[in-house]
Structure formats: structure tokens, C-alpha cells
Image (cartoon, coloured by chain):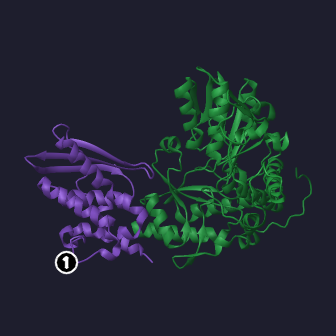
Amino acid sequence: MANLEDLYREIILDHYRSPRNRGELPTPPAHKVEGFNPLCGDEVTVYLDVEDGVLKDIKMTGHGCSISQSSSSLMGSAVKGKPIEQVQATIDTFKQLMTAHETTLSKDTEHDDEVDLRTLGELAALQGVVKFPVRIKCAVLAWNTLRQGLEEIAD
Amino acid sequence: MATGQRVTSFSASRVRADIPLLARVVNGRTITYLDSGASSLQPRAVIGAMSRYYELRHANVHRGVYQTANEATEAYEGSRAAVARFINAPGGAEEVVFTKNTTESLNLLAKSWGAANLQAGDVVLLSEMEHHANIVPWFQLRDTTGIEVRFIPVTDDFRLDLTNLDELLKGVKLLSVTSMSNVLGTKNPIKAVAQAAHAVGALVAVDAAQSIVHELTDVTDLDIDFMAFSGHKMLGPTGIGVLWTRQRVLDTMPPFLGGGGMIADVRVDGFTPAKGVARFEAGTPPIAEAVGLFAAVRYLEGLGMENVAAHDEELTGDALTRLESTFDGRVRVIGPSNTNRGGVISLDVQGVHPHDVAQVLDQFGVCVRPGHHCAKPLMKRFNLSATARASFGPYSMTKDTDVLLEALESALKMFG
């Protein structure tokens, strides 16, 4: 049986109650991208300020459940100030975490297809979400939106 | 119709004992099913009737001459007659079209009757509290024909705002409204609005998906022209719905889907559609589902819809009172006070998103529905993105509310 405590970790509730990097950036120069979950109505808007291959600043607005909004906040903290390549790698790692069955989660990197939780830092708090399959879409909303934004900037 | 003295033996605990699923244990707790607004649970009488049909009588309908084919046809048509009796259809079984669900019934209404009878400039009047199933088909029709879609507003106390009804009815050819909101629980004054709509020459359609299992339904008394509802919200199976309409209106409706069963004749130069309801039932229909619906109708008639309605009112009143006294404003009910309303209770829990509410409640085995409930215009009207909705069925009891309150307290604590 999946425990509610696996889902609602203290870090998650903390980011839900006091989201980091909340707000808007002037566009331009920043790029604005919106993401929706049409089924549950969750919304995330991401503002990206990319300069010289680095995600200089990121801000988010939106509304939705604790998982979608805390994931958005945790994402901002994880990628702000990082080179785009590293941001992309973090998106990959996080999405891999969300698609991984819980039994493949591992604390080491013996196997290539396993997620290295150590590289995720605070984001690892969201790993419990995979035990609640219907909530995965909440957790990945901000990340899909970020990826879309980066693609739009690259185009 | 059942009138006058009635010897009642209604007992929610007895109904509960008839529902196998209510014995299910979820997360270590016996299930507390409060999502009947989305889909009701089936008594053994319904499940058994469908099993017996498949075991003993299954054959395709309307074609064979052998024994079981005749029995299958009789069962299917018998269900139609039972539904007609249940809603007191003035023209009997010949006014009952079987569809897949309420959504398909409303689409049939828009795409058959609407496309044939409405033209650019005609107005279809809906309300702000409609389910998307009674909005989108009309927008689709607007986009192909140029009709106008208009909405009756909803008041701050969650009722239809009828102050400007005369103005709103100008140019209206069809009024299509819900008899009970799937979000607010509000029961609408169908008889009164139908009378006003008829006075300007409009026809009246009612989305009875919610009300069908919460009150006695009498289309003759309501004096309306169409009614749509689903089997699975009235203790029957999924996969079958009903569009009821008056015989004379039915005759003006062209076929919707083409194929077998809906024709009088097919030649190399064209076809002639069948007469009557068969015209709208192309292909092999949901036969076992009709058998299940038949059993559900008989079951509800056995309970007495007046008794079911009284039980629903008592249960709802108790829940509203206790939600207020227990939470002192931390849990807000998005819906009217306990008159002219049914057992659908939308909740806004302070500081807790509806999806999180539903997640915590699941831990207590409590089934509620989070989301916009396919009523986004209504959500927007009240500046909400979602609610957590608890809804009752004839098998619901105050002990379900006990668990709901306990679980809500836990959600508030966790996120507080």
C-alpha cells in the first residue's frame, strides 16, 4: 500500500506553501511559456531568461494541486543559473524518475537505465509520486512546460 | 404513476446490503463511496440480470426467429417500455431512444433535431450550470449553422437567475437545461421555465443525468419535449443512455447514424429510414445493458422514487449542517442551502487543492471526485478551478458522512 507520507513529503508541502521563484519576468527579453493539464485544470506559466547558453533567471506563476505547484517550485530552484545543457539533463533525469517503476529506483548508478537520486537533490522528494500514477501528470507539468520553452527559444 | 398511499419498505441499509461493491476494502478501510454523481453502484439485481441474460438468452435482437433471439428482443423492448413507464412518457415505449449515454443523447438532439430544425439566427438557450455535454454540441451546431447559443446566468446563491428570462427567451427555439447541477446540486424549476419557453414557441430539453436517481421523474407533468439521461447514474450499467422525446417531435428528426437496423429499405439508388425509434438505433444495440437498465428501473420502482428523494434530502441536510458546524468556514460548500437541491455537494477546502483533498480522502477509503466536473463555465462563474465533490446514492448513509468529515479533518491538518 502506498503511504500518503511518500507523496506529501515535508519538502513538498513547504514548496507548496511558500513557492520559490514565484512571479513574472518582463517579456522580452524573457520568454514566456504556458502549460495546462486540461483534465484537472492545473496551470503553470514559466518565464525564462536565457543568455549565452545559461538559464540566467526563471520565474513561475500558476495554480493547481500541491504536487504540480511544488514540482514547479522545486524545478525553478534546481535549474536557475545553470547552463542549458545541464538544465536539459536535469529535465531528462527528472522525467526518467517519473516514468521509472518504483522498484528500479536506486541509490547507485550501477545500471544506465536507473535514476541516480543523488544528482537530483531536493527533487528526489518527488519520487514518491510514482507510487500514485494518476499524480505523475501533476509532477511533470512544469517540466514539460520548461522543455517546451527551451525548444521555442532554440527555434 | 404511484400516487396516494404507499406502503414503504425503504431502508438505505437494505439497499446497501444489495450492493456488492460496498463491501470492498480500500487502504484498509471499508469503502465509503461518495461519487455516485459520476457513476452509481449496481445492486445484485442488475448484475444478476445481465449475467443471466448472457448465460441463457443472448442473441442479436430484431432479426432471428429462433427462441433465444425472440427472448433477447423481448427483453430489449421490454426495457424500453419499463423506461417509458419510469419517466411517465405520454406516448410510451415508442418515445424512448436508447443511446450510449447522456452525452450521446444530447448530441443526437443537437445533430439530428437541431440540424434539421434550427437555422442561422435561431437561439438555443442553455444555462451557466450546464455540463459540457449540454454545451459543446450546441457550439458545434453554431459553428456549422450560425445559430446563437445563449446562457441563463447563475445567481450568487447558486440558482438560475430568471429575473430577465423574458428577455433571454427572445428568438429562442430550444431551451436546454439541467434539472440538477452535477456540481452545485441545485434542482432547477423545470416546470416553470418550460412553461415560459413554450409560451414563446420554443421546445424544452432537460439534461436529467443527475436528477434521475434523486427524484421522481415525470415528463408528462413537467410538460417538456426532450429528456436525456444515463443508465449508469441510476444503478444501471454503463454503455446505455436514453433520449426521450414526444412522438410528434421524433417524427421530425432525421436519422443520426446510418447502418443496419435503422432502415425500412436499402436499394442501389438509396435508402428509406425505418419509422420510429429504430431510426436512431443503427447497428447492434446495447442489449445486455438494456436488460441491466430494466432491472435497475424495477429496483428503483421497488424502492419508490419518492422514498429515495426523501432519503437524499435528509442525508444532504445532515451533511450540510455537519460540514458547517464541524469546520466553521474552513470547508465551504459550493452550492445552495438545503431546499430544492439534491445530494451532490461540492467542497472548497481552505488551503487544500481539491486533488490533494481527494488524495487524502482515498487514504480513508473515501471516494470523491476532484476537478471541474465538466462544467468549466460554472467554475469560472465562481472563480474556481476545481472542487472536491461528494455525492450520494440511494445506498448512502450518514455513516458515510462521518468518514468524510473525519478524512476532511485529516486533510486540513496535513496541509494546515
Q: Position of residue B260 (x, y in %)?
A: 69, 42
Quadrant containing the C terminus of chain B in the rendered view: bottom left
Front residue of B63 and B167: B63
Q: Which residue occupies 79% across, 42% down?
A: B219
User: As displayed, is residue A152 above or below residue B332?
Assistant: above
| In this picture, residue A25 sits left or right of residue B383 | left
User: As displayed, is residue A49 above or below residue B35?
Assistant: above
Residue occupying the far front of the picture:
B268
Q: Which residue occupies 14% across, 58% down?
A: A86
Q: Position of residue A99 (x, y in %)?
A: 33, 65
Q: Chain of mark 1?
A: A
Q: Position of residue B89 (x, y in %)?
A: 82, 43
Q: Which residue occupies 73% across, 69% down?
A: B44
Display colour for chain A: purple
| In this picture, residue A23 sits left or right of residue B248 | left
What is the quadrant of residue B168 in the picture? top right
Front residue of A141 and B378: A141
Front residue of B84 and B324: B84
Q: Position of residue B412 (x, y in %)?
A: 45, 66
Q: Which chain is green?
A: B
- Residue type for callout 1: Glu
Front residue of B102 and B337: B102
Instruction: Look at mark 1 in the image and give the residue it sits on.
Output: A110
What is the quadrant of residue B274 in the picture? top right
Secondary element at image label 1: loop
Q: Which residue occupies 69% across, 62% down?
A: B315
User: As displayed, is residue B238 above or below residue B138?
Assistant: below
- Say whether residue A91 is visible: yes
